[in-house]
Amino acid sequence: MSQTTIFDELESQVRSYCRNWPVTLATAAGSTVTTEDGTEYLDFFAGAGVMNYGHNDPDLTEALVDYLRSGAVVHSLDLHTVAKREFLTSFRDHVLRPRNLDHKVMFPGPTGTNSVESALKLARKVTGRQHILSFTNAFHGMTLGSLSVTGNSMKRQGAGLPLTNTSKIPYDNYFEGATEDFLWLERVLADSGSGVDLPAAIIVETVQGEGGLNVARPEWLRALADLCKAHEILLIVDDVQAGVGRTGTYFSFEEAGIVPDIVCLSKALSGYGLPLALTLIRPELDQWEPGEHNGTFRGHNPAFVTGAAALKKFWADDAFQLEVRERAAELHEGLEKIASGYPDAVVKGRGLLAGIEFPDKGAATRIAASAFGKGLLVETSGPENEVLKTMPPLTITSGELQRGLGILREAAAEVFG
Ligand code: PMP
């Protein structure tokens, strides 16, 4: 029985990526993944934003293998371990202290949605309020709480109404160029007799990774932060996809100069594709009772080992950030060149989370399929998959980036004939 048959025979049809890329992956290195029959693909997908430092970075591999060979503990619930100490020390020294952040670190469970769930739950507990506001086209995860603040109705269909006290408000530029920011919300919230329930929190992505690469302007984010402060609403930034360097700085909100009350991180945090998530909490919000929010897999020691090594290797000085910004400029320039060949095609996104929206809503899917045939993994984004989305490893070389852009150029030309 071939391997493909066992997948089709036993796995649920909920699978999606393997339908676009019907191959069996075997190995990977840097920005390349290779199938079991030896076909190589350049990776503009990075495991949906997990492989920021490339596949199987040799230094991280060595740290992980050494750890496992040493007989060190792998599973530990939330017990103190040497690996967790190393990770927390690295995170404090390379991420929190240089940015003057005094947030506490909570390990909420293995994935992004676990972090979002913990953030929503803590916001409700601390404020004593129920309502959570999120944004049109937001994506925050697939478990029932995070799904209820997600804006994609296809993903929500059939799930019923998980949390009822949630509402979507317009993301930046939803009204195409309207600049009123939050005046309307400000007026409603200030009118205590209007019957509006003050929300516990507002949760936002600075770049909507799944929702179509919509970018929040820094001034819009500052207006949002000010509004939250004025009404004692907690500001949660979901940096699961846009964080860990993806958009140019370690946290995606640094450019705007805001300090969220709660930050959700996961995806690229372990640096190696191992599941790891954390929730940053302003110290005064850390009002959990011991054990009030727990789970079996909170803090995976092998992920702590690679996560600490990644922080030391890539974030110990500014050089890596500069490289990432150079690659991002190159990517945007290349995408602009491609888009300029097609009327009304628009480049979207920030940093190495960028793409092209085509007015023909099916074009991005067809370009991605054509690119796959030419050896490039690239996905789509947006409510109707109308955006071709590139998300290469941050460590991609200029040569690899140009090669991938060349494939996209050819694929677009083929699709538009
Ligand atoms: N938030 C954002 C912004 C995401 O992009 C994702 C995953 N695409 C999640 C939360 C959920 O993360 P996970 O799939 O690891 O649960």
Image (spheres, rainbow, N blue to C red):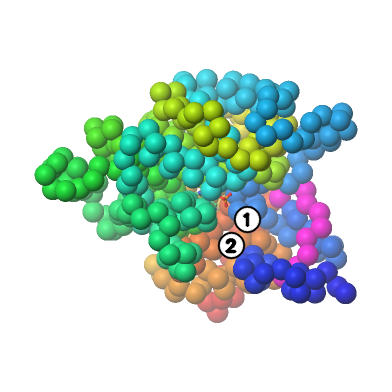
Badge 2: few (under 14), some or many (20 or more) residues near its Cα, within 10 Å? many
- Where residue 368 appears, as percent x and y from the top left, is 60, 67
Is 346 on the left or on the right of 47, as rendered? left
SS at badge 1: loop
Q: Distance between the residues labelled 1 and 2?
A: 7 Å
- Residue 25 screen position, x and y as percent: 78, 60
Determine which quarter of the picture holds residue 309. top right
Which residue is more in the foreground, 67 or 389? Answer: 67
Q: Mark 1 points at which residue?
A: 45
**Along the line of sight, the residue nearer the viewer: 400 or 364:** 364
- The amino acid pointed to by label 1 is Phe
Look at 14% across and 41% down and name the residue there.
192
Question: Observer-nearest residue: 183 or 300?
Answer: 300
Q: Residue 191 sits in which quadrant?
A: top left
Q: Is 204 colored magenta in this rendering?
A: no
Task: Specify the segment rendered in magenta.
Answer: 21-31
Residue indicated by mark 2: 379
Residue at x-position 63% and y-position 55%: 44
Q: Which of marks 1 and 2 is nearer the N terminus?
A: 1
Q: Is residue 381 visible?
A: yes
**Amino acid type for the residue under numbered disc 2:** Glu
Q: Do the residues labelled 1 and 2 touch (CB within 8 Å)?
A: yes
Locate residue 230, reporting x and y percent: 24, 32
Instruction: Give the quadrant of the C terminus.
Output: bottom right
